[in-house]
Image (spheres, rainbow, N blue to C red):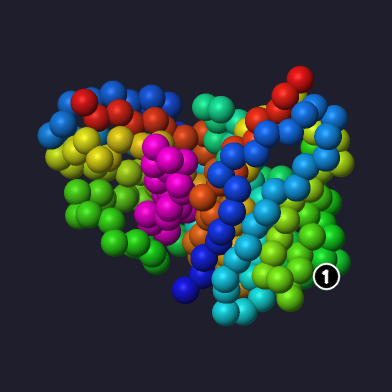
Amino acid sequence: AQSVTQPDIHITVSEGASLELRCNYSYGATPYLFWYVQSPGQGLQLLLKYFSGDTLVQGIKGFEAEFKRSQSSFNLRKPSVHWSDAAEYFCAVGPLRAGNMLTFGGGTRLMVKP
Amino acid sequence: DTAVSQTPKYLVTQMGNDKSIKCEQNLGHDTMYWYKQDSKKFLKIMFSYNNKELIINETVPNRFSPKSPDKAHLNLHINSLELGDSAVYFCASSQSNEQFFGPGTRLTVL
């Protein structure tokens, strides 16, 4: 069965500091990997996705993530955090077959200090 | 230009009532989903429909009945609401492996 673990429930960083949110997955084959962001009271917005190819993927809002097969990880990074990045971040894994469900991690709440 | 829309955005109701949440997507996608997000923000799939056919039902109680009148709509009807049904319900749609989410419906059962 597939599963996703986000080890950090809360993270607080200062504005302008770098950020890394961790995501580990368990999956029997090559997964499709996603990062979504949920701002307070809002729906989920896709930040970036990995299907194949270059293991470093660029997303929106200056985010990037790196797929490391050997570590079963897909960590999200941003070099300089803005106050507007404060939100809940979800890592998700999906199968290769279209139309199938996503399995989400428990989420990481990011707080940004001025 | 709303891609995936849900109504209502908020729903407050008494225990034992029956309620429905509607979802529509204008993306031309074949597959639609319902997810439940609990008070701890944990997101879990409930149902998946492909071209109006149910393909996933993740052990959701029979009180929850999805209905897909056409492939652009997937409505969720809930009978005999319980306190534990309080959550945010998200609709999503996909054509390939990327899913697009609606804004969510916050259901509060009193």
Point out the residue furthest to the top here: A114
The quadrant in which residue B6 appears is top left
**Residue B33 shown left or right of residue A105 in the figure:** left
Q: Nearer the viewer, residue A69 or B62?
A: A69
The residue singled out by tag 1 in the image is: A53
Instruction: Give the amino acid at mark 1.
Output: Gly
> Height in image: B59 above or below A1?
above
Residue B24, x across and y down, in percent: 47, 40
SS of the residue under disc 1: loop
Residue A1, x across and y down, in percent: 47, 74
**Residue B109 shown left or right of residue A31 in the figure:** left
Q: Nearer the viewer, residue B19 or A26?
A: A26
Region of the chain picked out in magenta, as a range: B32-49
The quadrant in which residue A110 appears is top right
The answer to if B45 sits in the magenta stretch is yes
Residue drawn at the location 24% of the way across and 30% of the way down: B109
The answer to if B46 sits in the magenta stretch is yes
**Residue A11 shown left or right of residue B26 in the figure:** right
Q: Nearer the viewer, residue A70 or A1?
A: A70
